[in-house]
Image (cartoon, rainbow, N blue to C red):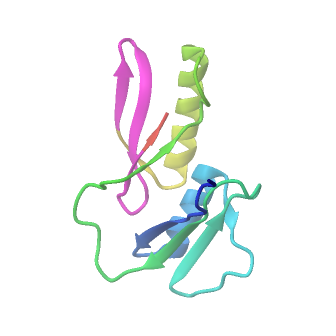
Amino acid sequence: MTSTHWSLGWDAADPRRLAAFWAIALGYVPEPGYDDPDGASLVDPAGRRPAIGFLRVPEGKVAKNRVHVDVRVAGEPPWDMVERAGLIRAKVAELVAAGAVVVREERYGDQLGHVTMHDPEGNEFCVA
């Protein structure tokens, strides 16, 4: 049995602004040929990961996300925890410059575990 091809749909007040932020966060690019004034679409330039579609909706975000994105900049374990912390902090700084807000740092004992953030529309995500 093969896996099912899927994409992620994302509601947004400003789809193009949110897509621009997530392109920076994930290293994605705008989907070639996609042109919708009330939407935006991003794809993995290598074609391996799911596409992300952003659609304008009239209502704003009112509660915590039930599903969120984890941006895993440190790769897979085992990790050099000092190097991992540096990668996390560098990505957090890049995303703050792009419009994200740091919510809190989570620690695993005395080591940096992940950083919880909000994207430009207040959606929660983590950098790990």
Which of these two is toward me, 120 or 111?
111
Q: Which residues are magenta?
A: 104-125
The relative height of residue 71 versus residue 42 in the rendered view (above or below) is above
Is residue 9 depicted above or below 22 in this figure?
below
Number of numbered tags placed on the structure image: 0
Q: Residue at x 45, y 68 (%)?
A: 10
Residue 75, x across and y down, in percent: 62, 31
> Majority secondary structure of the magenta segment?
strand
Q: For the view shown, which residue lies furthest in the front direction? A: 1
On screen, residue 31 versus residue 17, left or right, reads right
In the figure, residue 84 lies in which quadrant? top right
- Membership of 105 in magenta stretch: yes
Q: Magenta span has 44?
A: no
Q: Residue at x 73, y 81 (%)?
A: 33
Q: Position of residue 52 (x, y in %)?
A: 56, 65
Q: Residue at 67% across / 52% down in the picture?
A: 27
